[in-house]
């Protein structure tokens, strides 16, 4: 599945993906509606070039405590950073936000989901849910003197809707007003629009990607047979503000 992506990822400094499945703890595999994937998926993602993954989505609790543990353990085995779901409070403290760096540019990554398909988050595990009170505290706690960009990965919206809902638009604006530079969305399984915003000088200073659609999926509904890779180009020059450009690659 990933052989055609690797050449793209090999020329990219940081690659982050949404892992919308759990890893099997017992060697059995399952499809819809409760996802359980082979452990071999993790080294495949690593070999493909994913540098980090976000886990807060509506399927992270599909196989309860064991599913979260197997997923996190698999990522840690291969040294792949992650955020959004954690085995315990120690993991939350260490990985929320997830800090990624390239050169002199430092990113803080936050990840939340609207819910977990009605399956309760196991008492011994932690999943970041969309809660504006908590999100406001998380954003306020980020040291902006040591952080260049804040990126919010949000699992939200209406499945198969090709336009963002009013709720998505309001939450995106809320994130932007509180310091988010990029808002990246998943869950609808179809591509939704990208909106950029500019600063007082007319420079693009951030963007909202409402939904990236599907990267790997066997869904058969119309418009679910693909998605987009979102590309963010940041250029830093001495004495000048960063230049930011957002584009996409259909897949």
Image: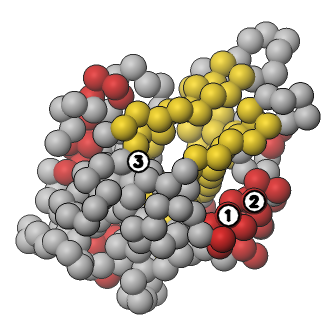
Quarter of the image where one finds residue 29: bottom left
Compared to residue 180, the image places residue 240 above or below, namely: above
Labels in figure, total: 3
Residue closest to the eye, 94 or 177: 177
Which of discs 3 and 1 lies nearer the camera? The answer is 1
Q: Is residue 10 above or below residue 213?
A: above
Q: Are marks 2 and 1 in contact (CB under 8 Å)?
A: yes
Q: Which residue is mark 2?
A: 173
Q: Are marks 3 and 1 in contact (CB under 8 Å)?
A: no
Q: Is residue 243 left or right of residue 183?
A: right
Would you name the residue on which mark 1 appears? 169
Helix, strand or loop status at disc 2? helix
Q: Residue at x 43, y 25 (%)?
A: 12
Task: Give the image location of residue 198, x and y in percent.
Answer: 79, 37
Question: For the residue carrying disc 3, how many other residues have a C-alpha within 10 Å: few (<14), some (14-19), or many (20+)?
Answer: some
Question: Which residue is under mark 3?
Answer: 17
Q: Indicate which label's residue lies in the foreground, 2 or 3.
A: 2
Left-right relation of 30 to 144:
left
First in sequence, mark 3 or 1: give its number. Answer: 3
Q: CA distance from mark 2 to mark 1?
A: 6 Å
Tell me where residue 131 appears, x and y as whole percent: 66, 76
Q: Residue furthest left?
A: 28
Between disc 2 and disc 3, whose residue precedes?
3
Residue at the image position 53 percent from the left and 75 percent from the top = 114
Query: Which residue corresponds to the image point at 27% horizontal and 29% vertical from the top-left?
Result: 6
Foreground residue among 160 and 60: 160
Measured in 3D between alpha carbons, the distance from the residue under mark 3 to the one under mark 1, in whole angstroms, is: 22 Å
The image position of residue 93, as x and y in percent, is 60, 61
Q: CA distance from mark 2 to mark 3?
A: 23 Å
């Amino acid at each position: 599945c990933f052989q055609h992506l690797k050449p793209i990822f090999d020329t990219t400094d940081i690659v982050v993906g949404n892992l919308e499945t759990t890893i099997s703890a017992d060697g059995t595999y399952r499809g819809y509606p409760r996802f359980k994937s082979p452990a071999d998926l993790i080294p495949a993602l690593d070999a493909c070039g994913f540098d980090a993954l976000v886990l807060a989505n509506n399927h992270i609790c599909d196989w309860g405590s064991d599913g979260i543990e197997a997923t996190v353990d698999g990522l840690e085995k291969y040294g792949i950073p992650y955020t959004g779901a954690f085995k315990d409070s120690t993991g939350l403290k260490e990985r929320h936000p997830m800090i990624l760096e390239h050169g002199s540019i430092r990113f803080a990554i936050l990840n939340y989901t609207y819910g977990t398909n009605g399956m309760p988050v196991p008492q011994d595990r932690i999943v970041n849910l969309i809660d504006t009170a908590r999100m406001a505290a998380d954003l306020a706690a980020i040291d902006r003197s040591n952080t260049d960009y804040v990126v919010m990965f949000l699992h939200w919206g209406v499945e198969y809707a090709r336009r963002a809902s009013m709720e998505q638009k309001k939450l995106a604006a809320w994130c932007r007003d509180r310091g988010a530079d990029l808002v990246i969305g998943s869950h609808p399984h179809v591509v939704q629009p990208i909106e950029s915003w500019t600063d007082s000088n007319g420079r693009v200073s951030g963007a909202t990607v409402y939904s990236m659609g599907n990267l790997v999926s066997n869904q058969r509904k119309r418009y679910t047979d693909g998605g987009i890779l979102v590309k963010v180009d940041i250029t830093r020059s001495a004495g000048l503000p960063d230049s930011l450009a957002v584009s996409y690659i259909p897949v």
